[in-house]
Image: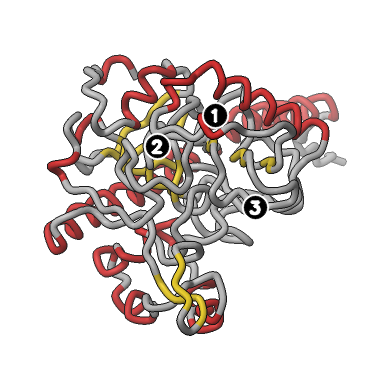
Amino acid sequence: MKFDRRGGFTLIELLVVIAIIAVLIALLLPAVQSAREAARRAQCTNNLKQMGLAMHNYHQAAGSFPMGNAIAYSDPGVQTTWGTFSAHSMMLPYLEQTPLYNSCNFAWTVWYGMGASLNATVWNTKVNAFLCPSDGQAGKDHINSYFGSFGTGTDPWAVNTNGTFAPEQTAYSVADITDGTSNTISHTEALVGDYNNTRTKWRQYVSGVPGSVPGNMIVRDARTIMPQVVQYAQNCMQAIVATPGTNSNKGLAWATGSPGLTLTNIIFPPNSTQYAFSSCRWDCAAGCGTDFGHIHISSSTHPGGVNVAFLDGSVRFVKNSIDQNTWMSLGSRDGEEVVSSSSY
C-alpha cells in the first residue's frame, strides 16, 4: 500500500513566513503614509497657488489687492468693520466660485447683527480651496486654513500695516510692495482650532492674558519692541498652561476678515516650539475668541515646515528652522530688507 505524502509547511516555517510578511508590512506602511502626505502637501501647495493667481487677477480688475475686510451694516443704520467680509470672499470669482460670490450680500456683515442671518448660507459653505487636506480638523467646525499676512505688527485693527493686507479697510497695490513681490508673503497656512482638544500644539489659544497691556505694545512693526513682545508671548504660554482657552476659533470661517480667522501677522517662526499656541489675545477677558488677537503662529502637519504663498504668485515651503529675522523680513512689504532665498 502506498501512502500519499503531500508537502506542507511546518509550524516553524509558517511562523517565519508570517514574521517576514509582518516586517514587510511594517516597512511598507511608512512609505504609504509618506506618499499620501506628499499628495496632500501638493494639494495644499496648489490651493495656495490658486489663491496667489486670484490675488493678481483681482489686482488686474480692481487696481489693487483686496482689502483685509470691508465695512457693512450690522443692523439698519449701524455700520461696522467687525464681522464683515474678508479678502477670501472678494477673491471668490477668481477661484471659480462665482455663484457663491453672487450669494454674498456685501452690504451686510456676515457674522454680526442682521447680517448673520442674511448671510448664513455663505457663512456655512465649505470651499475646498480654503482647506489644507493635511489638517484633519479643517472642514469640521473650522473651514479656513489659509491666512493673509498683515505684516509684522501687533495691531489687529491697523489701517496702515507693513504687510499685504490691513485689517481695517485698506487695499494695497503692487506699487506699495517696495520690497518686491517675490520677497513678500501673501498667505501662509495654520492649523485650525479644535474645541474638543484645547491642549493640542498650535491649536490652543489664550485671551485675557494677565497684566495690563500698555498702548505702546500696539505697534506697526514688532521688531521695534521685540523684548516686550517676547515677554508677552511668554505670558501667553504661561496663561495657557494655567488655563487653556475654551473658544479656540482659529480659522473658524473664510467669510469674515479678521486676524485669527483669515489674517495673520508674521512674527514668530512657523510651528514654534517655544510659543506653541495658535493665537494670543492680550485684550478682552478669558474666553474671548482668537479673532483680532495680537500674536498668531503659522503651523501645519507637513513635516518640517509650512507652505507659504508670495505676492509674485509662487508658493514655497518654509522650514521651521527659518531665522526669525528672515521670517519677519518676508512678512514686511516695505522694510527694504534684502532676503536671499537660500536663507530659508
Locate the N terminus by quadrant. Answer: top right
Colouring used for the render: secondary structure
The residue positioned 56% from the left and 44% from the top of the image is 293
Measure the alpha-carbon separation of dots 1 and 2. Answer: 12 Å
Is residue 34 visible in the rendered image? The answer is no
| Residue 335 image position (x, y, % from top left) | 26, 25
Locate the C terminus by quadrant. Answer: top left
| Residue 67 image position (x, y, % from top left) | 31, 56
Measure the alpha-carbon separation of dots 1 and 3. Answer: 21 Å
Measure the alpha-carbon separation of dots 2 and 3. Answer: 25 Å
**Vertical side of 84 occupied by 259: above or below:** above
Looking at the rendered structure, the secondary structure element under dot 2 is strand
Confirm or deny contact between disc 2 and disc 3 (CB under 8 A). Answer: no
Dot placed on the residue nearer the N-terminal end, 1 or 2: 1
Q: Which of the numbered marks, if any, corresponds to residue 271?
A: 1
On screen, residue 276 versus residue 145, left or right, reads right
| Residue 173 image position (x, y, % from top left) | 18, 48
Dot 3 amino acid type: Gly
Q: Nearer the viewer, residue 279 or 100?
A: 279
- Near mark 1 (Cα within 10 A), the count class, few <14, some 14-19 or many ≥20, is many
Q: Which of the numbered marks, if any, corresponds to residue 307?
A: 2
Looking at the rendered structure, the secondary structure element under dot 1 is loop
On screen, residue 304 versus residue 90, left or right, reads right
- Please state which of the two labelled residues, at mark 1 or mark 2, is closer to the viewer: 1
Query: Label 3, on which residue?
Result: 289
